[in-house]
Structure formats: C-alpha cells, structure tokens
Image (cartoon, coloured by chain):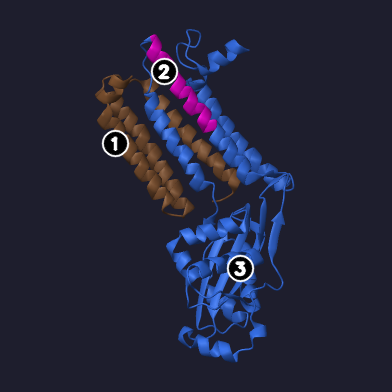
Chain colours: A blue, B brown
Amino acid sequence: MKDFFLHLFTPKESNNHRAKILHHTNLILAIALLLFTSFFVQRLKESFPSVLGVRADISSQELLDLTNKERQSNGVTPLYFNEKLAEAAAKKAQDMFEYDYWAHASPTGKTPWVFIKSSGYKYVYAGENLARGFSTADDVIKAWMASPDHKANMLSANYQDVGFAVKIGELNGEETVLIVEELGNLNMPIARAKTAEIATVSQKTTAVKNITSVDRQPLINSLSFGSNIYVMIILVFIFVFLLDMIIIEKKKVMRFVGHNIDHVLYLLLILALAGILGKGVII
Amino acid sequence: MLTKLYKHTPYYLSLIVILTLGFMLASNNSNKTFQIGVVIAITFFYVLWGIMHHLINHDLNAKIVIEYILIGSFGLAVIFFLLSTSGNY
C-alpha cells in the first residue's frame, strides 16, 4: 500500500522519476473524471434535491434588519417595510423564473418600475438590488455592501421604504435562491421629514409582515460540497508538484518535463478563484 | 533550486504579475461570464508563456507542450466542476 502511494505521489525509478499522478494518462483520467462527476452531480441535484441541493436560510426580516443596521451605522435613517414593494419584489422574482432571465430588465423590456407601479406603489424614487446563489442573509448584505452601486442603493437617503422577496426556482436550468430588493420613496426626499409627521406612524414599521423566506436544508449542501472537493483536488496537485520538485532537486535527476513552479503558480490562481467563482452573484 | 529560480526571475515575475492581474480583474467584476472569460484567457496565457519559456531555453519537446495543455485543461475542468456544483453561473 505504502509503495503504491509513493509510486503515485513521489518521483521514483518505478514511475520514471515523475509522480505517477502527474503522468499524461493520469492527467487525462483526472480531467475526464472531473467532467463526469460534474454531470453526475448535476443529475443528482435535479433528481434528489433533498439529498444534494442548495442549502439556504434567508428571510426578508433578516434582510431588513441587516440593511437597517448598515444604514444606521452609516448615519442614514432606517427603511420601513412596505407590503406593496414586497409584492413587486415577489412579482419580479416570479417573472425571472418564468421567463428564465437574470437581469434588471426582462427580455421583453419590462423594467423593475413596471412591477413596482403595478403593485400600487406610486414612487418618486425607486431602485432595485438583485442577488442569487447565497445561503445566508448576511452573505447577501455583505455582497451588496462590497459593490459600490448596490451599496449606494442600500444606503441612499432617497429611499424610505423597502420590500423583499426570497424565492427558490430554476434559472438557466439550475436551481437557485433568488433575492429581490425593491427600494422606493413616495415623496420627494427633502420633504420627507414633514410628511413623516403627518403620516400615521402605525402604517410604517421595520417589522416585516408576510415574511417571505427560504429555509432549505438538504442532506448535502451543493455549494460547500463543490468548494471543498475543488480545494482538496487542487491542494493535492500543488503538494505533489512541490514534492516532485524537492525530491528531484535532491536526487539531481535530469529529465525533460514542464516547470513545476509554473504549474504551482497557475494552480494557486485557480485555488484563489474558488473564493470568487463559488460565491453567489449580484446585479 | 534557488540558483534556477534566480536565473529565471524575469520569467517567473512576469508570470506572477499576469496571474495576479487576472485574479484582480476577475474579482473586481461580479459578472460570471466575464470571470470565466478571464480564467480562460489566463489559462491560454499560462500555456503559451510556459511553451515560450522552454523554447527560449532550448528544451522544448512535444511532451512538454502536452503537459502544459493538460494542466491548463485540468484547471478549467476543476473550475467547471465548481460551477456545476454551485450552480452560480
């Protein structure tokens, strides 16, 4: 057994002084195995979503609380939950799943303002933030706050009300969690202080009525499952390349192969990209 | 090993700079299609740069070319695996 692993991961005479896992045939095998596993995992996700699927625990109340926390820490007045905007957000999410698109404007040219107006919210200012593929409300807010445009929307003093929709559905044939945030103001922001006094306080609340939430806990979370295997595979190859380099250098063996440092640098970049490509998306 | 590294410093430095720039480009844009485009471009660059380096050192052969292509393909296959499991594309 020990000999087998040494043959597989270290350069020896038996493997022509190159770890067997780095031989061309084994690299082709690894690529084929990765592609096969990708298709297999996709089929498994479709057929058994309760076993392997997107794990998410996001509610509109959490999103509102976290948004207001960010606004307060930036010296901006908190947003009030508005049922009409929440209705508009739900309509928008439904429309995106129905017509299979991921954009602020639909393929038929429907803008967010169409959904907001059709819900009966006669806005002076309105805005929209979208997110997909996140597991927690905290991650969604962090991603929006990291993007200058989304952050400007979230912290804008032009908005007074907000509505959220959190829905699970299929986009581009992939199951995903969609988060829609519709922001608005019925009045000119400058006059808000006066109108706020006239408006009945009971109509405005920072508590969400009719909470929309997603709480899905499949046996295996496909997000972390994919990331963990990804990191593991790359680390194994980096380790083998480094080990190969050190042993060959010590043994002073002459051979004509690619530079291991090149491969290690490239694989390090691929490893770093896991943090970006595996994350949810915002627009 | 250090002598070899020192001898090839400009090559490795340029490779590190390009890979870092690619990473920064991909991380500063949340568009997945753009990010995937950057990854493919970097992979292409890495294969080309590796082959060029061996060519300059007069130790290029077909096996080395195949090795760079296979490692590049392996990197893309791992990315494909991550995207298909996360569903974020």
Which residue does the image show at 42% across and 42% down from the upper left? B40
The residue indicated by pointer 2 is A246
Q: How many marks?
A: 3
B47 displayed left or right of A107:
left
Instruction: Kindly identify which chain the residue marked by label 1 belongs to.
Output: B
Q: Looking at the picture, how far across and down is residue A92, in whole percent?
A: 60, 69
Residue A77 at least partly seen = yes
Magenta span of residues: A233-251
Which residue does the image show at 40% across and 24% down from the upper left? A260
Which residue does the image show at 69% across and 63% down from the upper left? A213
Say which of A278 and A187 sits in front: A187
Instruction: Mark 2 or mark 3: name the one nearer the start of the chain.
Output: 3
Judged from this view, the residue extending furthest toward the bottom is A198
A266 displayed left or right of A172:
left
- The three-letter amino acid code for the residue at tag 1 is Ser
Q: Looking at the picture, how far across and down is residue A84, in whole percent?
A: 64, 78
Say which of A44 and A192 sits in front: A192
The residues tagged by marks 2 and 1 sit, at their Cα atoms, a distance apart of: 23 Å
Vertical placement of A104 versus A1: above or below?
below
Instruction: Kindly identify which chain the residue marked by label 2 belongs to.
Output: A
The residue indicated by pointer 3 is A64
Callout 3 secondary element: helix
The quarter of the image holding the N terminus of chain A is top right
In the image, which disc is placed on residue B14?
1
- Image quadrant in which you'd find residue A241: top left
